[in-house]
Image (cartoon, rainbow, N blue to C red):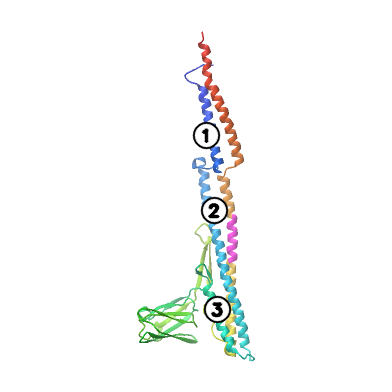
């Protein structure tokens, strides 16, 4: 065995092992402090890449689950409005049936109730909202004739509550800001007179029989006569809602729901007529039957969409749970294992320090050889 003073190999060897145990102990301490076994890319380059991608997916799925639950709340609000409209239609059928019988003596009162109930349907359709989003007031669209322009005094035409069909607008311009407007449709017409149409204001005529509103400005001084140029062609409108219920921009992660226009003259109900006479009441009974059929179809479609979203959200919840489990397996620290490793490294460090003291004292043994 060689005895050297200049280089203490035993000390160097002990220092190397002490450094290894200190580094391992620091790593165990970091994992126990953070709760993660991967704290930087150097710990596991492949693992941190996979865990990051899975974590991003999990965050997106969590938000998609929120979107789905909010969509259900939104559609449940719409169904609540449909349910009340269904109750009103039931009452309308009841009073129409009463008025259709020869023993009825006060059809005027019944027709007044009909008008009030139809007005309430319009209010429900208008006021059934989710936040500020209208749910039952599906916006109809209109193609306007070439003469219906601001230059001719027609500032705006609102058909959001109108049923599909073709209307013709005629006007009579009168000096002094007075204008008479007539809206003609298949089977009838309605005239609204306006006053106060000046250079500083616009006035809106509401054709309640058809769900059309026409705003007139001061340019309306020349009469508009019936022609193709004064036609308003209304296409049945629906409210279309799209819900993102997945973590990718793809069709399988998106659900769309269309809800028709439930206003009185809207495409779904399209209520018209009265019950002032036996014949009118009999016709109105058929109108109500059609409206009820359309409403139940829409409600069934809505219910199917709600079930679809519910199943989708349930599947998302399962996927999200398993994704988070996978992230945990890759990234989270096993405290039992890490504590055992930390304890081992603590013991190795203590024994290493003790052995380093012994290794450093080895050169002193050479002094005995130098004593003569």
Between 321 and 199, the residue placed more toward the observer is 199
Residue shown at 58%/60% (left/top)? 313
Q: Circle 3 — which element?
A: helix
- Count of numbered circles on the image: 3
Mark 2 or mark 1, which is nearer the start of the sequence?
1
Return the mark for residue 23.
Answer: 1
Left or right of 251 in this view: 168: left
Query: What's the distance in space between the residues labelled 1 and 2, CA to CA?
Result: 33 Å
Mark 3 or mark 1, which is nearer the start of the sequence?
1
Q: Quarter of the image containing the N terminus?
A: top right
What residue is shown with label 2? 58
Between 231 and 342, the residue placed more toward the observer is 342
Magenta segment: does it hold 312? yes
Q: Nearer the viewer, mark 1 or mark 3?
A: 3
Q: Nearer the viewer, mark 1 or mark 2?
A: 1
Against 322, residue 45 (above or below) is: above
- At which x and y percent is residue 65? 56, 59
Against 351, residue 88 (above or below) is: below
Between 226 and 274, the residue placed more toward the observer is 274
Q: Circle 2 — which element?
A: helix
Against 278, residue 61 (above or below) is: above
- At which x and y percent is residue 200? 36, 78
Residue shown at 51%/48% (left/top)? 52
Part of the protein shown in magenta: 306-318
Residue shown at 55%/45% (left/top)? 331
- At which x and y percent is residue 51? 53, 47
Please indicate, yes or no, whether residue 53 appears anywhere in the rendered image: yes
């Amino acid at each position: 065995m060689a005895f050297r003073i200049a280089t203490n190999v035993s000390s160097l060897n002990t220092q190397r092992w002490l450094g290894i145990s200190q580094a391992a102990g620091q790593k165990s301490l970091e994992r126990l402090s953070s709760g993660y076994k991967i704290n930087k890319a150097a710990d596991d380059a492949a693992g941190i890449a996979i865990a990051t991608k899975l974590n991003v997916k999990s965050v997106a799925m969590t938000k998609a689950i929120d979107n789905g639950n909010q969509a259900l709340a939104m559609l449940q609000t719409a169904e609540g409005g449909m349910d009340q409209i269904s109750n009103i239609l039931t009452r309308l059928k009841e009073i129409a049936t009463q008025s259709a019988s020869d023993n009825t003596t006060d059809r005027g009162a019944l027709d007044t109730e009909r008008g009030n109930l139809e007005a309430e349907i319009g209010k429900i359709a208008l006021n059934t909202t989710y936040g500020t989003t209208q749910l039952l007031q599906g916006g109809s669209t209109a193609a306007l004739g070439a003469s219906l322009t601001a230059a001719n005094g027609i500032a705006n035409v609102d058909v959001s509550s109108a049923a599909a069909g073709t209307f013709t607008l005629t006007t009579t311009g009168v000096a002094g800001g007075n204008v008479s407007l007539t809206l003609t449709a298949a089977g009838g017409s309605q005239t609204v007179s306006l006053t106060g149409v000046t250079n500083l204001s616009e006035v809106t005529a509401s054709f309640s029989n058809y769900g059309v509103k026409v705003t007139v400005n001061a340019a309306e001084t020349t009469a508009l006569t019936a022609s193709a140029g004064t036609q308003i062609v209304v296409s049945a409108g629906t409210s279309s809602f799209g819900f993102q219920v997945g973590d990718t921009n793809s069709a399988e992660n998106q659900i769309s729901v269309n809800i028709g226009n439930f206003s009185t003259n809207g495409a779904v109900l399209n209520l018209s007529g009265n019950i002032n006479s036996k014949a009118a009441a009999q016709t109105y009974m058929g109108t109500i039957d059609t409206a009820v059929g359309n409403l139940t179809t829409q409600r069934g479609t809505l219910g199917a969409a709600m079930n679809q979203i519910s199943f989708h959200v349930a599947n998302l919840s399962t996927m999200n749970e398993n994704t988070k489990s996978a992230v945990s397996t890759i990234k989270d620290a096993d405290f039992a294992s890490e504590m055992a490793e930390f304890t081992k490294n603590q013991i190795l460090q203590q024994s290493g320090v003790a052995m380093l003291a012994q290794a450093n004292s080895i050169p002193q043994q050479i002094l005995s050889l130098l004593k003569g």
